[in-house]
Image (spheres, rainbow, N blue to C red):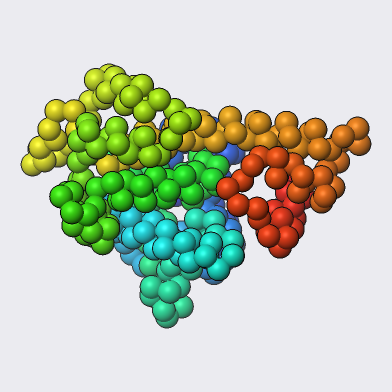
Amino acid sequence: HNDGVDVDADADAEGSVKQTPVSDDTSARGVEHMRPPQCWLTFCDARSNGRLKKQWDKDGRTIISPIKLRSMVTTIYHNKLKSDVALVREGKHRYPLAEYVAQWFDNTYGLGKMAQQKMVRFIFSLQKMYEEMNDRRVCQFVRMCGLFHPLPAVTCDLLLECLEIISGCMSGSGEMFRSDTEFWSTFKSGKMVAISKEKQLLIMKQVFGPKQDATAVRARLSQELLDNPEVVPSYVTLPAGNVSLSRFASFTLEIMHDMSVESRSSAMELFRAAAGSDAAVSFTEFKHACLAMQPLCSPSEGSFAFMYWQGCRV
């Protein structure tokens, strides 16, 4: 259907759209606040939001249905997870989520113009659902891609690791899903997946390990559910104490992110110490600081070089 949102009328002949400054205010969710990643604009052959909007106008302002959009988002997560595993196995670096999304559209729809059209519809559909704030899964994806109110790049990696653990805990003999494939198929279909109290605790123990008291974290989730009860469609029954996968993943991700921030602070102290009096980190000092963090396996020389190069660009 053609229910769209109007863009700021101030569009010049070049097709650019007047944008308001980037804001931390989460109420800033209109098209004028939208910041599509550069790789998305390049993929769509659009140098600005205005050109992107013109393409959408030409397409009749087509919007993807909510359940299909949820399915697309989850499919992208699943495919990226498989891609990440393969890249790590080959000793290569994982792609940032926004870049992977562009690759996914290219690989999925093949023909250039069709893929661009699908991507434009996807972008404006994400914006519409984010503005309406009626889907936790999609809103989280929007922020991780940086379309609105960007989250740190590591957030996507943390979420995928969490989903992989959840899938492992809920799949197999005697579990809700017979296999990992069935778990992801159900999740991608848009159906709600309920997680029992017992399973929540088991997953949290695997996600956080000894760094967090899983029982205390589970109690914190219970209190949050009491303070802000989960809203589900009338045709869905959520047993007492259960939580939807999307709500559970969102809650767990917040804690994982907080832990990551604390870890980042510790890492910065190591880099400052390695830099010494000149306050500049050489490549050798960078490697020493990285190894002091006691990674599970030592990165290759090429990986060190890539990380150092990325750090120098910031």
Vertical arrangement, residue 211 with respect to residue 42, above or below: above
Locate residue 164, reporting x and y percent: 37, 51
Vertical arrangement, residue 314 with respect to residue 41, above or below: above
Locate residue 230, reporting x and y percent: 22, 30
Please state if 29 lies on the left or on the right of 303 as rendered: left
Query: In this view of the protein, which residue sits in the foreground, 110 or 174?
Result: 174
Locate residue 224, reporting x and y percent: 30, 22
Write down the quadrant of residue 159 in the picture: top left
Please state if 97 lies on the left or on the right of 182 as rendered: right
Residue 50 visible to an observer of this rendering: no
The residue at the point 39 percent across, 45 percent down is 162
The residue at the point 12 percent across, 32 percent down is 239
Please state if 182 lies on the left or on the right of 138 as rendered: left
Residue 288 visible to an observer of this rendering: yes
Query: In this view of the protein, which residue sits in the foreground, 191 or 25?
Result: 191
Locate residue 253, reporting x and y percent: 42, 37
The residue at the point 32 percent across, 39 percent down is 203
Q: Quadrant of the N terminus?
A: bottom left
Q: Which residue is farthest bottom?
A: 111
